[in-house]
Image (cartoon, helix red, strand yellow):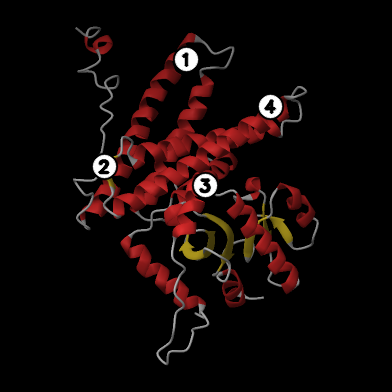
Amino acid sequence: MDIEQLRKFLLKLPHVEETMQWGASLVFWAGSKAVGGKMFAVADLDGTSKGVLSFAAGPERFHELLEREGLIPAPYLARAYWVCMERWNILPERELKENLTLAYELVFAKLPKRTKDALATSKPKPEKRGASGSKKTGKRDQRGLLQSHVLFSSGMIFSAAEIAQKHDRFTTHWHEQRPGLPPESYGAFLDTVIAQHQANFELWHTEDKARIPNATDHDIAEVKRAIDRINQRRNDLAERCDELLLDHLRTRNLPNPGAELNSESPGLMIDRLSILALKLFHTQEEIERKDAPEGHAERNRQRYAILKEQRDDLVDCLDRLWQQTLAGQRRFKLYRQLKMYNDPALNPAVYRSSS
């Protein structure tokens, strides 16, 4: 099987859509992203990933598939029980189709009821026809797929799922190497999302220093000042996310001033997603702790499941807010945090001590 045979097979499944994401990744969704669909397979088109195709396996089949030569844990998605094929010929075509169908069914079964209801009432996609009136086979070369992505990106792609994936990717990377922004640019918006996540990453680990049992009063005072500085940067970057989104919307005469106002802005929701990514990472660490007491791993598996559900729900809500804003049905505002503790003119503990 190759990429075009893959597309031809998967796009025949009910409610399956494809999008280009993250440079040159072809993502297949169980249900439209616009109504809360979830991805179940990702194909690499330019050979920059560790494998050619990743897909959802589920907890029951994950370890069984990993026993096969050429199947590895999917980068950034292994915790969700995804596997990755290093080459196209790893699995016979029939077996690959069976695994992809199971991946689709596994993900589709977990879609929220509201998403399934929306898909049930949606009209089927019309078949594309060529100039002669004959049905198109759907065949496009990889270059064409990449070019369509470039054109789409010039408008602006907003994907809460991609934001969550970036959070997971850099959380793992920064635990292995010194935290820092990537040398490559993902565009002004995603660059800001990553910078905001880095602030949360630094804040998380700086706060831990204040909890060290033998920390001195001087140590704790220094940590507190560092926390204030990082927290200010975190809030500034969350606001910057909203500024960039609103700048983009204004080019389309949006948000609609008459639409219903959402009480929480995307920037604030992105900040919450960032915190959840850190909680998921460190909870997984506790699950895998070798020196943990009895029952510790199971307790943290339960915590992980709760956190995962919370993040999935928040991803759905953020994507839906953006789609409804584009449709003129909802709007959001930039809400300034207006923190007072870092401003010497507004914090009485500061200006009274200097007088």
Direction bottom: furthest residue: 132
Residue 177 can be seen in this image: no
Q: Residue at x 49, y 58 (%)?
A: 120
Q: Please report whichever mark, 2 or 4, sits nearer to the chain's N-terminal start.
A: 2
- What label does residue 260 carry, if any? 2
Amino acid tagged 3: Lys
Q: Secondary structure at mark 1?
A: helix
- What label does residue 299 carry, if any? 4
Q: In front of the other: label 4 or label 3? A: 3
Callout 1: few (<14), some (14-19), or many (20+) C-alpha neighbours within 10 Å?
some
Callout 3: few (<14), some (14-19), or many (20+) C-alpha neighbours within 10 Å?
few
Q: Position of residue 157 (x, y in %)?
A: 38, 58
Tell me whether circle 2 and circle 1 mark residues in contact (CB < 8 Å). no
Q: Which residue is mark 1?
A: 220
Q: Which residue is mark 3?
A: 113
Q: Position of residue 4 (x, y in %)?
A: 58, 77
